[in-house]
Amino acid sequence: MTTRLPHEKGFHISWDQIHRDARALAWRLDGKGPIEGNWSAVVGITRGGLVPAMIMARELDIRTVDTISVKSYNHQSRTEPHVIKPPQADIMGADGEGVLIVDDLVDTGRTLELVRSLYPKAHFATIYAKPMGVPMVDSYVTEVSQDTWIFFPWDMALQYVQPYRGTDA
């Protein structure tokens, strides 16, 4: 058996796939908001949550969109998460009730744990989830193994890739 590096167990997401998955998540949450079935706002966790948040805001016809900037990675190395830019206080209220907070992925759950401590009544939704992070998210579309590295389309360029096994002859 060949030992693979962490990035070799990759899950590659295309622009089409992220769009389909964000729409699927929006459809699951349609009519489920606490305000007569609606959500008061969408807040994307930057940077990965920006694309899904925009798609979900469009699908759910939510015009109030903001961001919370949390830094928890330096390239592919995890660091202690911290808020760089909070969302507007008047959008979040005292506890985030009625707000849909969106990210691309929950990995260990540390980022969502931090944001949830600030806005405990918000609804946390991610497109993808890893087992360690699942307890921190309220809704998600696809679960992947903890040792899978997800390659998002905004991180990729089109280029030739060697076959997984063998050589290209």
Image (cartoon, helix red, strand yellow):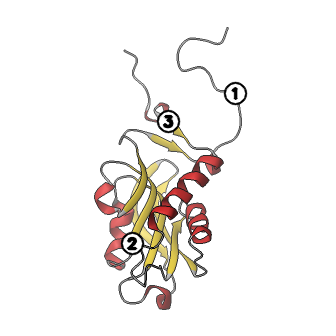
For marks 1 and 3, the one nearer the N-term is: 3
Left or right: residue 134 compared with residue 142: left
Identify residue for label 1.
Answer: 160
- Amino acid at dot 1: Tyr
Provide residue 102's location: percent of width, then percent of height: 48, 66
- Cα separation between marks 1 and 3: 15 Å
In front: 71, or 156?
A: 156
Q: Residue at x 33, y 79 (%)?
A: 121
Q: Residue at x 52, y 15 (%)?
A: 165
Q: Which quarter of the figure is the N terminus placed in?
A: top left
* Label 3 SS: strand
Provide residue 48's location: percent of width, then percent of height: 54, 59
Label 2 Cα crowd, 10 Å radius (few <14 / some 14-19 / many 20+): many
Left or right: residue 124 compared with residue 8: left
Provide residue 101's location: percent of width, then percent of height: 45, 71
- Amino acid at dot 2: His
For marks 2 and 1, the one nearer the N-term is: 2
Q: Residue at x 49, y 36 (%)?
A: 10
Identify residue for label 3.
Answer: 10
Q: Residue furthest top?
A: 169
Label 1 Cα crowd, 10 Å radius (few <14 / some 14-19 / many 20+): few
* Label 2 SS: strand
Left or right: residue 132 compared with residue 66: left
Label 3 Cα crowd, 10 Å radius (few <14 / some 14-19 / many 20+): few
* Label 1 SS: loop
Provide residue 33's location: percent of width, then percent of height: 42, 77
**Which numbered dot is residue 123?**
2
**Rendered view: 148 above or below 33:** above
